[in-house]
Image (cartoon, coloured by chain):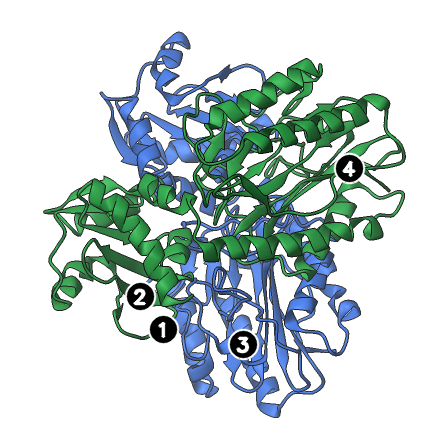
Chain colours: A blue, B green
Amino acid sequence: MLQPELKLRRDKIRALMAQQEIDAALITCNVNLIYTYGRVVSGYLYLPLNAPARLFIKRPNNIEGEHIHPIRKPEQLPDLLKECGLPLPAKLMLEGDELAYTEYTRLAACFPEATVVNGTPLIRKARSVKTSIELEMFRRSGIAHTKAYEQIPTVYKPGMTDRQLSIEIERLMRLEGCLGIFRTFGQSMEIFMGSLLAGDNATAPAPYDFALGGEGLDPSLPIGANGALLQPGQSLMVDMGGNFNGYMGDMSRVFSIGKLSEKAYAAHQTCLEIQEAVVEKAKPGAVCEDLYNTAIDLVTKAGFADYFMGAGQKAKFIGHGIGLEINEAPVLAPRMKQELEPGMVFALEPKIVLPGVGPLGIENSWAVTAEGVEKLTLCKEEIIEM
Amino acid sequence: MLQPELKLRRDKIRALMAQQEIDAALITCNVNLIYTYGRVVSGYLYLPLNAPARLFIKRPNNIEGEHIHPIRKPEQLPDLLKECGLPLPAKLMLEGDELAYTEYTRLAACFPEATVVNGTPLIRKARSVKTSIELEMFRRSGIAHTKAYEQIPTVYKPGMTDRQLSIEIERLMRLEGCLGIFRTFGQSMEIFMGSLLAGDNATAPAPYDFALGGEGLDPSLPIGANGALLQPGQSLMVDMGGNFNGYMGDMSRVFSIGKLSEKAYAAHQTCLEIQEAVVEKAKPGAVCEDLYNTAIDLVTKAGFADYFMGAGQKAKFIGHGIGLEINEAPVLAPRMKQELEPGMVFALEPKIVLPGVGPLGIENSWAVTAEGVEKLTLCKEEIIEM
């Protein structure tokens, strides 16, 4: 990662720190190190408000340079900062929503004179508005994601289970460069590479806060494909995480085994119309809850409200910010007064689950521009018959 | 999961709680819910010392039964406990090494009268000694893992990169039932399904605390395969996470592209001898640091100490407990006075990295029995030429 880009990102965080009179941030969680240092290391990035950042590194042992110092344990930080000629912070921020309780208290105890505050919301706010380099990474990721999805019909064979088809799609994603790992914010969300939901398995509620559920293959990971045979008349939705360079692109597409019922095509069309209506309103200044309500109004008029965003259990959002993690700000949900800003990137996923058929709908990733939004995921959007 | 098994696990935790006079545990992290409730849910398992456990559940919305209660937010817990006729705890334990700082403090604030302590070490201690059902799950997982590895030579094609071969092996693992997800303890360890390290990429140091490193494919995930062409004269090591049912079996095997140098075969043989010597001593009462020192003595005598457990950067352990996470107790490392107990399961991984050749050595998963250890991963152990 080039220094000017890292400086830009660090300065976005510093601007928010200044508003809260925070003197320094101590950053040690992987995604925040990717954001502020450009790669994962084991160590601490110390980000003062008014001085260059310092990296205190445990591993790997082959990184050297200006403002980079080896460290064994965080208790060395105060002395190392003094050696660098840096004052100890009066107000320090730590990653309070991400660090484990014992790790946070250990780090806070290294600075007994400091007021320690939770910096996670602030860092996530900075991360929610992407730089032009981050947007370019999303565009590249969208192209690779699209290329993988376009090959899906070539790996389908009649008589497959949802699990078998999912495995072949995972392979396509990996061959196009997907790193595989699926990063989420918060300890309770987890999934392998993404999900393939076919038929009534899409009605199965899951413990996780994803848009749709699925029974999964094992009680230790109850999400996604459940091993059932793919059957004629079923729809299936592919929703694999598009992590090709650290940024979690998000795209869902629907396929059918033979023809579907008329109602299924109507439901799918409704989701495309919701996407169109929301995208029409999505621009800087648009309020997230208004976008959500636009979707609810349309799906209610179309008569599919009971099946929108899940059958028995429903997701209470139609879209979510994406970035280094799949669940970033903003969230397109009820009571969210947040306004869109240029540089925000979000996934919009109006989805309907029809019992007896399966999941319908669409998901694309969008970047907010000066005037509207730019689509980052480019596969065709109709139901593809296999 | 059957109730008697869950009761057995909960009682293992309760026995340790009694020693510290802890009245109740509040469990909400996924792996600990799998352990104590048998599956992932979004919610809280409240485990009193002297009364049946109660599950307070947010999602999924289709779980009902005795001692199961819906909940929206943790602030409802005190009232819900009173409705159940349960007293509020005087001493409560939370998952302090796993919960985020803000989540821990939020839960603690729900019980303002209670003394709140970190329960993670205690739960991990209970989890470190497996039940007979957990051991059986490890055995089943070892069989599937072995079946996948035995097919590796069939997917190798000359001219492949390490990345391409890794993708085909990931697919074999998935087809044999691997769930894919790789669970670790601590926020800083992460990897996709596992690693394939070939040639000098095995000398690349990584930020993570795995036995070996590798440059990886992207700075956002600097571990494992780096996309280099597989070359004659190179060794490669496959080390994929064997998660087939929640339990993280661990096995590494070495393959060669054509013949290797004499020194490489000698290094591999040294690792097999280290395994034999450590396994000979591994039984209830054996001290972890003694097992580590046994390995160091042997590798030093054999003249490979400089290359043991990494070339430029070395792992400071030769083995680690495994379970629902890849890094559990016990750890076979210097200064670890912990003794092996029947029911513990660990991976033993003596590995040597030879610059110019690649990684050599072995890794198997072992269960501690009454008299010794039982091998859980059963592939042949010599270098397989491809």
Q: Name the amino acid type tagged 3.
A: Asn
Pointer 1 or 4: first along the chain: 1
Residue A206 is left or right of residue A236, and the answer is: left
Residue A179 is left or right of residue A55, and the answer is: right
Q: Secondary structure at mark 2?
A: strand
Q: Are marks 4 and 3 in contact (CB under 8 Å)?
A: no
Which residue corresponds to mark 1?
A: B63
Tell me the residue at 36%/45% (across/down).
Answer: B126
Q: Name the amino acid type tagged 1.
A: Ile
Marks 3, 1 in one chain: no
Q: In the image, residue B185 lies at what x, y percent?
A: 45, 41
Up the image or down, A253 lies above or below A181; here it is below
Q: CA distance from mark 3 to mark 2?
A: 21 Å
Pointer 2 or 1: first along the chain: 2
Which chain is disc 2 placed on?
B
Q: In the image, residue A161 lies at what x, y percent?
A: 67, 73
Q: Secondary structure at mark 3?
A: helix
Q: In the image, residue B240 lies at what x, y percent?
A: 65, 45
Which residue corresponds to mark 2?
A: B57
Which residue corresponds to mark 3?
A: A201
Q: CA distance from mark 2 to mark 1?
A: 8 Å
Whether residue B316 is visible here, answered yes or no, is: no
